[in-house]
Amino acid sequence: MKNALFSFIITIGTFTGTTFAQDIPGLVASNYGGLYRATYNPAVLGGPKHKWQINIGALGGSINYRYFVFIGKNSLLYPLLAPHSTKELYGRSRTMGSLMHADPLFLVSEIRWPSASFSLGKYQGVAVQFRTRGFVQGKNMPEAIRNLYFKRLDTESTPATSNESWGDFDLVQQSFSDVSLSYGIQLLDLDAHKLRIGATVKRIFGARIGYLSGSASQFSIRPLAGSPESSELVISDLAYESGYSAPNQKMSIGNLFDADKYGTGWGYDLGVSYEFGSFWQSDTEKFDESPAYLFRLGASLTDIGSIRYRTSKSRVITGRQPESVIGQKELETISDKGPEGFMTLFPAETSAVFGRDVKLPQAIHLEADVQLVKGFFLNMSQTKRYGNSNRSLDIYQPESFTITPRFEDEDSDFAFPVSFIKGNKRPSLGAVGHFGPVFLGFSNLNGLIKKSGARGSMVYLGFSAWKLNRRQNRE
């Protein structure tokens, strides 16, 4: 883009629920992705395409088809609302969809606050970014349980079941904010070989966790006596542990940095990229600085670090019930108020404080980007969890392999990611468009059309402004 462009962020509300869920398919692969690629691989800041770039605002969340039915009432940032509100969270959460088709349950939302990057001459660049992220993760949540949550217990849409086995289960909600500083440098600049590296350090603040872990021998869904249109959930031999790092409270900017009230921590990212070839270099277009490489290889580690919870008003309870009965009212109490709502319904045999360290969604990313014709690329990327951890409270990213055909130039990008997520039987077909200052994308269009279950798609919306780093500006 020859001149700076600008607009404003539109705020829309959110749910329960990443790369993939935290980074924007298409833009994370784009040579003009800038800030949006830097969270995936900070090496992009070495030899940057932009003299400067500003993210005016961006948000994303995992939604299902119901979001467009109830868009006026519900929202897509539920994991970010849960620590600070109890208003209609049950209804809001039901407009969101899991990115996993079956077990485990995985939902996410994110806000990218105003952020900026700047080039430092021809070969170096820096970026300062602000983000808020929220996650909901569930393990071994049976389809019948997810269905009754989605379709309610006070309608005839929830079928009866009898004595279905269950086992151990977990349901965790976490949210946190971070401010990060990134730096990239280009180490090699030959016609056919270019090498870039980058690193990010981030400070985590305003973190809050709430969870329920337990086990049950079996469960049933039975019609409510005297009210055939309503049902109730009966759980046998329920053992549970529920806790939170801080009670639900209205958000105060000053309190977010207080380690006595919210979790804090540190994290970092590392990235490298290598470009080979200059086959697509134009000898006739003086100002054409489009990528000329035949292929680009990249690797990065993201979110290496942890959150430390040592808050003063935390609480953890444990208990056991031979039989527990949950109706629609109780379901909404737990959904709206989280662990605090659960604790009002189930007795505590023991009570303690919550003090643990929780890992960030550590991941390793590998990619190969091939330029088939000038301006048309085929990107292949893989995301895997980094490190070994089976702790139920640790945040993670779904493992995925994505193939993305992409058109790009200075002003626009159009990408069509096809993602194969570990555990899903079918690929997710997405579409992302970036034109001028605006981008909009979906990771799974089929998830917004199919009405069975609560399958979801990430949706992204954002606005940015920038000025390209022309050759005369670099030298």
Image: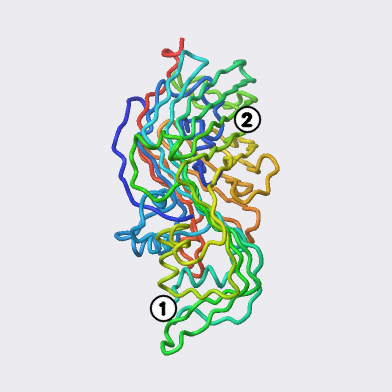
> Taking the image as drawn, is residue 14 in sight?
yes
Q: Against 186, is 110 above or below?
A: below
Q: Is 419 on the left-hand or right-hand side of 179?
A: right
Residue indicated by mark 1: 154
Residue under the image location 48 percent in, 51 percent down: 458
> Taking the image as drawn, is residue 101 in sight?
no
What crowding class fits label 1: few (fewer than 14 Cα within 10 Å), some (14-19), or many (20 or more)? some
Q: Nearer the viewer, residue 229 or 472?
A: 229
The location of residue 214, given as percent across then percent down, is: 61, 62
Q: Is 262 on the left-hand or right-hand side of 372?
A: left
Residue under the image location 33 percent in, 58 percent down: 87
The location of residue 73, given as percent across then percent down, is: 31, 61
Q: Earlier in the sequence, mark 2 or mark 1?
A: 1
Contact (Cβ within 8 Å) of mark 2 with mark 1: no
Kind of residue at disc 1: Asp
Kind of residue at disc 2: Leu
Q: Against 341, is 369 above or below?
A: above
Number of residue marks: 2
Residue indicated by mark 2: 294
- Taking the view exactly as shown, the residue that stands out farthest to the bottom is 226
Secondary structure at badge 2 equals loop
Query: Marks 2 and 1, Cα distance to the nearest angstrom?
Result: 59 Å
Q: Quadrant of the N terminus?
A: top left
Which label lies toward us, 2 or 1? 1
Q: Is 455 on the left-hand or right-hand side of 9?
A: right
The quadrant where residue 321 appears: bottom right
What crowding class fits label 2: few (fewer than 14 Cα within 10 Å), some (14-19), or many (20 or more)? some
Secondary structure at badge 1 equals loop
Q: Which mark is residue 49?
A: none
Q: Nearer the viewer, residue 321 or 465?
A: 321
Tell me how the rendering is colored.
Answer: rainbow
